[in-house]
Amino acid sequence: MGEDLFDGVPAQKIEIAPEAFILPRFAFETAARLVTLIEKIDKTAPFRHMKLRRGRTMSVALTNCGEAGWVSDCRGYRYEKLDPHSGKAWPDIPPEFIELAEQAARSAGFDGFLPNACLINRYEIGARLSLHQDKDEGDFRYPIVSVSLGLPAKFLFGGPQRSDKVKRMILSHGDVCVWGGASRLCYHGIDPLKPGEHALTGAVRYNLTFRRTSEISG
Ligand code: SIN
Ligand code: FE2
């Protein structure tokens, strides 16, 4: 158990690897507001299925908010200042998002996390994210903060090598996962989303991942 207090309840902290934690239901109270804000972002920067370098299309739909957004196309992965869909800047990160990311990072032992990029993933039934590292940020001093909303998903978390043993755990609505330090470059992914219906999101899982990137093109 962690020592932090969240809404008067001692916040639970599950260590899944060195300096990697799940904070169960950490975002539960603000979840409905987060979903409303995601729907608002979708109106200016709509969810889209990006292409991977080798030509396949991602099953996960994504959008971004912040100073830079993560994009993928035939040239590979990178952070871009402008949304390639509109040619305009990505929407700002809502203050509620920043506050949540900062508090979650602090609860996991990473003080002073100020994200400048937030990738928003939308999983429909069957969508998955294969094992990968988050390594396009150029600076690995800052953690990754990931917020799960809507349908539950099976999260895979391995080590710094692709061949390292992978742990599997369920991430449910409101759960937050934080990894940094020794685990910052750990491989992770999401198994195909199982059919279901969530009161707030329908047949969808959203995931917010907060990052601080120093590598911004465009
Ligand atoms: C990601 O690795 O970008 C997202 C992980 C998740 O959806 O939980
Ligand atoms: Fe990732």
Image (cartoon, grey):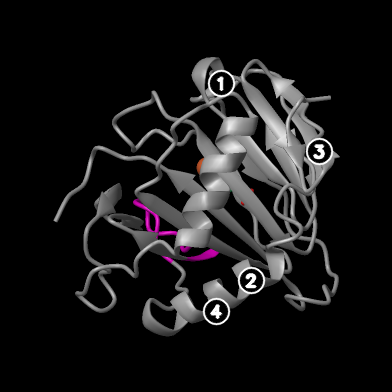
**Residue 126, image quadrant:** bottom right
Instruction: Say which amino acid is labelled 4.
Output: Glu
Which of disc 3 and disc 1 is earlier in sequence?
3
**Residue 198, image quadrant:** bottom right
Instruction: Say which amino acid is labelled 1.
Output: Ser
Instruction: Say which amino acid is labelled 2.
Output: Arg
User: How far apart, in angstroms, are the residues tagged by discs 2 and 1?
Assistant: 30 Å
Which of disc 1 and disc 4 is earlier in sequence?
4
Q: Mark 1 points at which residue?
A: 183
Q: Name the residue under label 3.
A: 169
Which of disc 2 and disc 4 is earlier in sequence?
2
Residue 178 in the figure: left or right of residue 149: left
Which of disc 4 and disc 3 is earlier in sequence?
4
Q: Choose mark 2 or mark 1, whichever is in front.
A: 2
Residue 165: give x, y in percent of width and height: 71, 19
Q: Residues within 10 Å of mark 1 (few under 14, many from 20)?
A: many
The answer to whether the beta carbon of the residue marked 1 is less than 8 Å from any atom of ligand 2 is no
The answer to whether the beta carbon of the residue marked 2 is less than 8 Å from any atom of ligand 1 is no
How many marks are shown on the rendered structure? 4
In this picture, which residue range is highlighted in magenta? 50-62
